[in-house]
Image: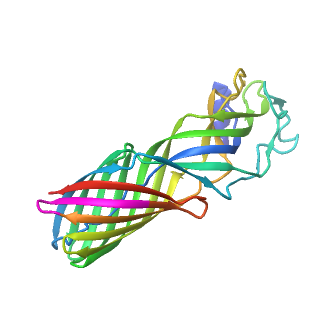
Amino acid sequence: MFLLCVISGLFLGLAGCGDSYKMAVDVGSFDVSLPPTVRGAEFNMQENSSAMRVTASVHEPSEKSSHLSRVFNGAAVVCEGEQHCPGKKDAYNSYGGERFLHPSKADIYYNFKSFPVSLSVETLMKSERRLLVYGFGLDPMPYVTAAIGLNSRYGEVGINTYLGLDYSKTDYSFRAIYTYQTIGFGGDTYVGSFEGKYDEYQFNFRGGTGAHASLFLGSVALTYVPMFNIPWLWTTDLKTREPDGILLEHVSRESDFDVTFKFPFYFSNYFGFTYNAHGGLQYSLGLTVINGTQLDERLIFASTSISYLF
């Protein structure tokens, strides 16, 4: 890998193999889309049968924020010692070319948002008492869901999961450090640091896993869905922006820097009431309660939906 990097640099004049970009977030808010409600059939399906279910949901159109406690930026270093990092400072260094980020508290908020409408399509398959449900949805970003469990005349129970794409508004102030090595003919090592603010939308993945349980009372199903959710799944970097009026030689206008904190998880608990009408229709009402060990507030969102099975 090192040889490949060197060869590329000799011919193309690209960045060196020792580049490092780190950032700490001081204050920030990050949008979080509510998780989809991944449920079972919510009625006693006939054994060895299958069905399709199309669901249109209406959600409480609101934004509710919660402060996150005990979130800390970890220590970071881009190079150590003059023998490893003897290079010159970049064009602008608000901290004089700092190479270290010391541990610090991150003052972060999750801004939970529910889009007014969502749509999902699911396949339900039952073999004896075993039930499999899988599908996809839009809220408005795409996601996929899956659930497996047991379904009987008295109720159902199972486990479920989802994975989706999100397009989230971010607003945060940061401190960044980096080292950049140019290799090839006359290569140099640059050390830089700067601070700034970023307030744009960014793509990210979200996911969760949990369980579902329903009690059948005639045509009515009482449903509970607890979920463990990670809103910024696999996120290890965020974008930075150069300070206004400053052009850094070796950092693009918007660059990805490794973050030094982990995005906290949260819990969601859905409590629902579903009426199974004639003609394959299902009418549902529910409340989703958001909480977590690092969320300072408990938030509640309402929703209603209508489903058609065929």
Q: Can you give x and y, in whole percent of width and height, for residue 81 in the image?
A: 87, 44
Outermost residue on the right side: it is: 82
- Do we see residue 219 in this rendering? yes
In the rendered image, the vertical position of residue 125 relative to residue 13, given as above or below = below
Q: Name the residue nearer the viewer: 93 or 10.
A: 93
Q: Name the residue nearer the viewer: 259 or 231.
A: 231
Specify the quadrant of the image occupied by residue 246: top right
In the rendered image, the vertical position of residue 173 relative to residue 11, given as above or below = below
Q: Name the residue nearer the viewer: 3 or 283.
A: 283
Q: Can you give x and y, in whole percent of width and height, for residue 56 in the image?
A: 27, 50
In the rendered image, the vertical position of residue 130 relative to residue 84, given as above or below = below
Q: Who's the residue at 83% across and 32% down the image?
A: 87
- Do we see residue 19 in this rendering? no
Outermost residue on the top side: it is: 245
- Quadrant location, the C terminus: bottom left
Q: Is residue 179 left or right of residue 84?
A: left
Q: Which residues are magenta?
A: 277-288
Q: Can you give x and y, in whole percent of width and height, for residue 169 in the image?
A: 52, 39
Q: Who's the residue at 80% across and 49% down the image?
A: 102
